[in-house]
Image (cartoon, rainbow, N blue to C red):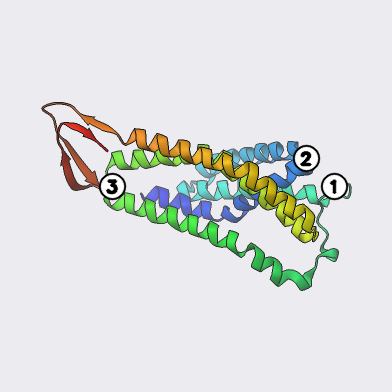
Amino acid sequence: IEPARLYLIGYALGVPASNATKVLSSFMQMDGDGKRVINSVIVMTIVDVIGDILVVFAFSGGMLGMGIATAVGNSFQLAVLLMHFTKKNNMLRLNFRDLPWRRTREMVWSGLPVGISRISNTLNGLTVNHLLAMFATSNAVAAYGVQRSVDSLFNVFYLGAAETVWILSSIYYGEEDKNALKELIKVTYFIATPIIILIAFILLIILFVQNIRVVPQAQAYVIETLGKFKCVWDAGLHF
């Protein structure tokens, strides 16, 4: 537990950069600079590996140092992506002189729900991991790991669609293009919504099938919740 805690402390320094790269990567694809995303990942990996080697063999920094090395790698990845917005021939570019500073409050208010969502997800993960460390058995921890992996797999579909809609709506909103916003809402409602519902339905079926258990004759299963006794299943079909 202690090595993991030290690593997370160091890794936390790079969380803002990591979140920023997730958002900026979508802009790279829209602006025809998809190779930059790949290059940024390569740079991040190289920096992280070199940092880990230096921490282990040169500085003896332990798990805290390795977490910091990962954070530095994330920062380098962000730096590579930000270089895209300095080019004048890009559709999307960074220009501080033309920023609408008077609308800063409006922009912050518009992005507040996303910030709250990210903070809530972080707190949720910390709480669940703390509860698992305190009460859960090794089987429960393994099951939670599998659930997170499956969830990440399906995130590719529904979060990808949601993030695309979010980016396009932000652009149309900034340009005050009401017709484009209306069209985007129609497309989202008639195309993306049925896909998300279908994926959710498949997930429910998978979860339902996985929770069906048949206890053989002359046997009994002891059911635990967070490492504590809950009940006993006799022979037969159980959900």
Residue with the mark numbered 3: 136
| 211 or 149, nearer to the observer | 211
Q: Tell me the distance, in whole angstroms, between the alpha carbons under discs 1 and 2.
A: 9 Å
Q: What amino acid does circle 1 point to?
A: Asn
In front of the other: 221 or 55: 221
Real-space CA distance between mark 1 and mark 3, rounded to the nearest whole angstrom: 51 Å
Q: Residue at position x 54%, y 43% from top? A: 58
Where, by quadrant of the figure, is residue 172 drawn?
Answer: bottom right
Q: Which residue is mark 2?
A: 33
Q: What residue is pinned by disc 1? A: 90
Residue 125, can we see it? yes
**Pointer 3 local density, CA inside 10 Å: few below 14, some 14–19, many at least 20:** some
Above or below residue 115? Residue 239 is above
Q: Residue at x 73, y 70 (%)?
A: 104
Q: Earlier in the sequence, mark 1 or mark 2?
A: 2
- Residue 7 spot, x, y in % from top left: 46, 49
Instruction: Compute the Cα span from label 2 to label 3.
Output: 45 Å
Residue 44 is situated, as x and y percent measured from the top left of the image, at 64, 42
User: Are dots 1 and 2 in contact, CB under 8 Å?
Assistant: yes
Question: In this rendering, would 214 be left or right of 51?
Answer: left
Label whose residue precedes the other's in the sequence (2 or 3):
2
User: What residue is drawn where x is 45% and y is 58%?
Assistant: 123
Look at the image and tell me whether residue 77 can be seen: no
